[in-house]
Image (spheres, rainbow, N blue to C red):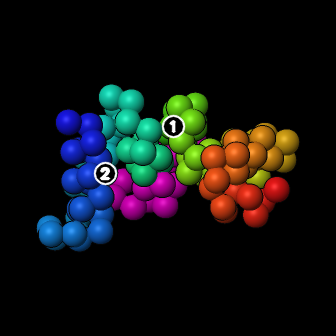
Amino acid sequence: HLDAQYNYGCCLRDSTGVPQDDREAARFFRRAANKGHAAAQCQLARFFESGRGVPQDDDEAVRLYRRAADQGHPIAQYHLGNCYAQGQGVPQDDHEAARLFGLAAEQGFVLSQLHL
């Protein structure tokens, strides 16, 4: 069920077979994220970071990125690394940013490799 909730959120986000609806997408991402789905946590974090479908909230974005990153999700590790690099929602910390970029790069996430 978690994958289905996440996938339906992606359909709503991208207007794939259904009308585009960011608020409803965020609702489905949240349902899966609350049950530990790392990709949903990462996607919901991106929504909070940008204010897409939810009120913009850097603290909540960082919290969700961290939950997904702690599960080894490379995209979340990359985005959390960016938060540390920019001091967005966390104190600026180049060492922590590099550590997170390294974790994502080890999994082949190319954007992280460019930050090392």
Nearest to the observer: residue 14 or residue 110: 110
Nearest to the observer: residue 62 or residue 105: 105
Whether residue 55 appears in magenta in the rendering, the answer is yes
- What is the x, y in percent for residue 60? 50, 41
Q: Residue at x 33, y 28 (%)?
A: 35
**Disc 2 or disc 1, which is closer to the eye?**
1
| Residue named by callout 1 | 68
Q: Residue at x 34, y 31 (%)?
A: 34
Quadrant housing residue 33: top left
Name the element at disc 1: helix
Name the amino acid, label 1. Answer: Ala
Q: CA distance from mark 2 to mark 1?
A: 16 Å
The answer to whether one can see residue 84 in this image is: no
- What is the x, y in percent for residue 76? 56, 46
Query: How many callouts does the rendering have?
Result: 2
User: Could you tell whether 75 is left or right of 40 in the image?
Assistant: right
- What is the x, y in percent for residue 49? 51, 55
Q: Residue at x 52, y 45 (%)?
A: 61
Q: Residue at x 23, y 71 (%)?
A: 15
> Label 1: few (<14), some or many (≥20) within 10 Å?
many
User: Could you tell whether 7 is left or right of 70 in the image?
Assistant: left
Quadrant housing residue 72: top right
Whether residue 59 appears in magenta in the rendering, the answer is yes
102 in relation to 49, above or below:
above
56 in relation to 14, above or below:
above
Which corner quadrant holds the N terminus? Answer: top left
Which badge, 2 or 1, is on the more N-terminal residue?
2
| Residue named by callout 2 | 26
User: Could you tell whether 109 is left or right of 30 in the image?
Assistant: right
- What is the x, y in percent for residue 92? 79, 46
Extent of the magenta region: 46-62
